[in-house]
Amino acid sequence: MSSTSSQPPADGVPRPPDVVRRLALLWDPPQPSGRGRRARLTLDDVVGAGTTIADTEGLEALSMRKVAARLGVGAMSLYTYVPGRTELLDLMIDRAFAELPLPPATATWRDGLAAYARAHWELFQRHPWILQTNMWRLPLTPAVLDAQECGLRTLVDTGLPERQVVEILGLVDAFVRGLARSTVAESTEKDASGQSNDEYWTSMSSFWVDHFDPQRYPTMLRIWDAGGFDAEATPFDASLDRLLDSVEMAIDRARGAR
């Protein structure tokens, strides 16, 4: 006969044990008992050590054993504080997102959304390892949801349909993450090769003389001749302004349709 614990929950909501454990650690973490000997470490110590390793060596270097070594304890002792690497990474992401200087509710939609985007951009520069995670499956942490709530709030009263609010915020998130990934990749490549972006492309100059075929790529040649490729790489804020101009057009259309 099946035990009571194996029966489906009365509300029909699945609660796999590993998910329950992950969420409880984020939303209802255990508190120090205050009895007996004072613990040598705290949960915050463990999360901080994991973050430092990821910041300096990348996410691939993160392991419970390496965190323990950094803290000067045995690996098994860490499991007193966090069940495993997955849960540790959840807590590291929550800690990182808690750094975001989120805009106030009183900001205009454009100022608020610009501040939201810029805060995430700067966060990814400080903690590039976040971009190594699956951003479509960010853990449901308090700070991650605080950030999402803030982003949605900037647009919800603009006249846009609710579904479009979600779509536009997703577009802004994808823009910031994509540009941040490219910037981090360029910085990593520069450190590894010793070449700046300009120096790399200068080293490839012979391609345009020896292999480039103007008849095969006439549009590229036309834009080149017109100076279209002469501009420096567009700064983040300038690119963001162009994106927000498009958002403003969508808002104007939504208001006009009312």
Image: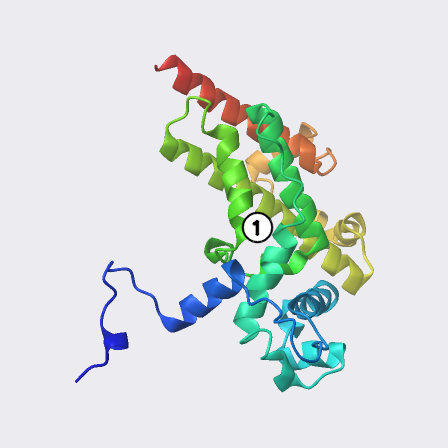
Image coordinates of residue 32 in percent, x first then y, are: 62, 69
At horizontal 56% and vertical 28% (from top left) the residue drawn is 244
Depicted 164 relative to depicted 56: above or below? above
- Please tell me how crowded label 1 is: few (under 14), some (14-19), or many (20+) other residues with Cα within 10 Å: many
When the figure is inspected, residue 43 is found, relative to residue 198, above or below; the finding is below
Residue 234 position, x and y percent, is 69, 36
Q: Is residue 16 left or right of residue 81?
A: left
Q: What's the amino acid at mark 1?
A: Ala
Query: Under tag 1, what secondary structure?
Result: helix
Specify how the rendered protein is coloured: rainbow
Residue 208 point in image, percent of width and height: 69, 47
The quarter of the rendered structure image containing the C terminus is top left
Q: Nearer the viewer, residue 5 or 185?
A: 5
**Residue 174 is at least partly visible in this image:** no
Which residue is tagged 1?
Answer: 143
Residue located 42% across and 72% down the image: 18
Residue 107 lies in quadrant: top right
Q: Is 68 placed left or right of 251 in the picture?
A: right
The residue depicted at 38 percent of the width and 72 percent of the height is 17
Image coordinates for residue 52, horizontal then vertical, percent: 73, 66
